Amino acid sequence: MTDAVLLDAQNIVKHYGSVEALRGASFQARAGEVTALIGDNGAGKSTLIKCLSGAEQPSSGRILLDGAPVTLDSPTTARRLGIETVYQDLAVAPELDPAANLFLGREIHRRGILGKLGMLDKAEMRRRAVDEFQRLGVTLQSTDVPIGSLSGGQRQSVAVARSVVWASKVVFMDEPTAALGVVQRERVLDVIRRVRDQGIAVVLISHNMPEVLSVSDRIEVLRLGTRVARFKAAETKLEDLVAAMTGALTQEEAA
């Protein structure tokens, strides 16, 4: 583990009209670690992640990246700063093959006049995709079939790989193993570990507490729109997480 904070959200407040979804929430993530963000439904997890990935703008508070204040006014800005997000609904194009999905929105064009006419270099994209999948330990039945024909675990692995390939700082993963079987879940968790080992800060949002404890280095707990506890996963039991989420364990007790 490292003590250097890569992403630091300080006292984030978010209003939706008269509703206060975040009430001064703070959050930290470190390079080369998996930090889990947990909390009951309505705790503010999704709102906080939207603010940290540029999908929403906080009403107040500060966000620092590598110690410098940043304004994440759109997902495009976040991506330009090296922040990517894997959403629960995958957001893949099922009719395209894995390589095309990996380069979706970042396609490689052929050189010369053909590239100027909009023709894609599919062979180069496929070659690079195979290299990236191997680097991340992603095993696919085939790289030449529509991604919609692959298993749920393989589709999720491609979605994770796509974000990781383009992320240089942080990857947010929103329930990445939801609706997956045991074997598929383990494959995705292995990809997450490989991403962490490459120095990326991984932020995992999950309701699966055993999974959180198995893959995370640190855990931060939100309740009613604010952070109430922080843990080192190796020193934490399931009962501690449940107590923090329900309010039985205070921030002072968890520190």
Image: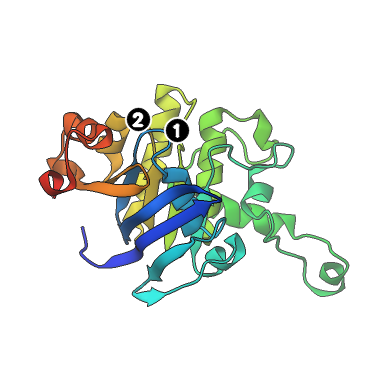
Badge 1 density bin: few <14, some 14–19, many ≥20, Cα 10 Å: many
Residue 217 visible here: no
Q: CA distance from mark 2 to mark 1?
A: 9 Å
Q: Secondary structure at mark 1?
A: loop
Q: Amino acid at mark 1?
A: Thr
Location of residue 150 in the rendering, given as x and y in whole percent from the top left corner: 61, 30
Q: Residue at x 40, y 23 (%)?
A: 182
**In this rendering, position of residue 99 left or right of residue 22:** right
Q: Residue furthest bottom?
A: 68
Location of residue 186 in the rendering, given as x and y in whole percent from the top left corner: 38, 32
Q: Secondary structure at mark 2?
A: loop
Q: Residue at x 38, y 40 (%)?
A: 43
Q: Which residue is mark 1?
A: 177
Q: Residue at x 64, y 42 (%)?
A: 92
Badge 2 density bin: few <14, some 14–19, many ≥20, Cα 10 Å: few
**In this rendering, position of residue 78 left or right of residue 7:** right
